[in-house]
Amino acid sequence: MNEITHFINGEHVKGTSGRFADVLNPATGEVQAKVPLASKDELAKAIEIAKEAQIAWGNTNAQRRGRVMMKFVELLHRDMDKLAEALSREHGKTLPDAKGDVVRGLEVAEFSIGAPHFMKGEYSAAASTGIDIYSMRQPLGVVAGITPFNFPAMIPMWKFCPAIAAGNAFILKPSERDPSVPNMLAELMIEAGLPKGVLNVVHGDKEAVDGILDHEDIQAIGFVGSTPIAEYIYSRGSANGKRVQCFGGAKNHMIIMPDADIEQAVDALVGAGYGAAGERCMAISVAVPVGKETADKLVAALKPRVEALRVGPYTEGDNVDFGPLVTGDALKRVTGLVDKGVEEGADLVVDGRGFKHSTNPNGYFIGPCLFDNVTEGMDIYKEEIFGPVLSVMRAETYEDAVGYAMRHEYGNGVAIFTRDGDTARDFTHRINVGMVGVNVPIPVPLAYYTFGGWKRSGFGDLNQHGPDAFRFYTRTKTVTSRWPSGVKEGASFTIPVME
């Protein structure tokens, strides 16, 4: 049995807590490794090492830090196939999707090469008589990331690349379900020239999470996961005086206007709804066609496309559109929600519940599911399913369609498909959702913009990656400076004002 290690101070370190979690192969249901679950003492030791390493790293000039990121990007390209295969083996997603996971993280590493620009402050000469004022950005110290199973390469890099480029040391607590790739990324950072101790990977469960939330030397925490956990981490971390950004659940709508190209909309829905088995926070899970004619055409075109989707393990290569869910519990939950949708009266147009893979009958596979006539009161509409389930929710008018997305408690992503510029402009300005696509089904911003949802999809004042990342991982110090030209007599007891 392969035993995965922590990665602390530039080395693989065996766990000492005596507690482990199974790492499964989702395609077969078999245990392929075990991962240690850190105690608070193990975590504290890693934080102590990071705190010591950060002093010299924080004093390293930003250009040199950017060069480490530049080399890291080169190494990611070199090891792309190796990283993707390890990711697919533990997560279950297809190899092309796994490579996309790595590339989306790599792009944030590329953006972080520009650390010298983003660390610049401001300067005002002669703000008052003989007085100059300037600001500087400085690293926070030791910061942490708690990242989810569904993007084991991308989201860790979204967190640690800008944090480290800004001069911080980083504690990464990745998902225990697919822990190998985070270790591999840490190895590559050392190879790229990062000093030992600046990036540490500590595997664990709630004990490690609570240790991060409560440790006095952790200055900031980034999290991606479910909304209940996001709320818990945000409230407890903030109560402990930490800077916290948390990104939670989603229910992403795609509105299809009567003037939209139906075939283009169907292509978008199939890819955005069923890619990665729906285990994406930016997956489109609700299609909202406007008008009966639009809805009828959409469902008629979707049905054969959804039925034709190929489900299987990543080892089948190009013959697979999506793979298994990550665990048996995930499969049970998704199946239960589909059952509930049928009970609540939605029309199950395509039923994937009985799918069994021919050579992997114990894998966590479910076929694609397509619902029609879903309504706002149904659980399959209210909850994030996180599986290959697409719901069609019919709207009589554009205003009805916008209202559905506006009223939902989640506000992560949304899209509209239309050929009318006025409608699109109205939609983008009015909608209360953080990321908006116009004829783009998965509106994930590129690395030089920020990523973040509204409402109960995001907690905190700053988004992840883009310029916000450097704002989040630094604090601003403002200096007011005067160099007197001669000796001044007497003290002033009034607040300084501009003269």
Image: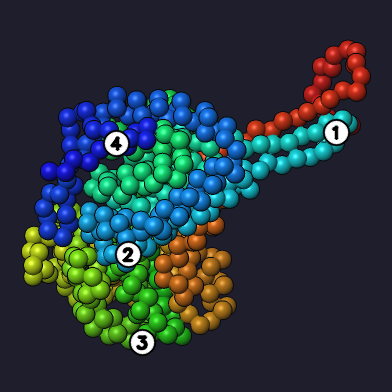
Residue 437 drawn at (x, y percent): 47, 69
Give the crowd class for mark 3: few <14, some 14-19, many >=20 residues within 10 Å. Answer: few
- Amino acid type of the residue tagged 2 in the rendering: Asp
Residue drawn at the location 23% of the way across and 59% of the way down: 92
Residue found farthest to the top: 490
Mark 2 or 4, closer to the camera: 4
User: Spatial distance from mark 2 to mark 1, Cα to Cα?
Assistant: 57 Å
Q: Give left or right: position of 411 versus 490.
A: left
Residue 124 versus residue 233: which sits nearer the camera?
124
The mark that comes first in sequence, 4 or 3, is 4
Kindly state the secondary structure of the residue where label 3 is placed: helix
Q: Which residue is mark 4?
A: 12
User: Spatial distance from mark 3 to mark 2, Cα to Cα?
Assistant: 34 Å
- Amino acid type of the residue tagged 3 in the rendering: Glu
Q: Which residue is mark 2?
A: 97
- Tell me the quarter of the picture where residue 474 sits: top right
Kindly state the secondary structure of the residue where label 4 is placed: strand
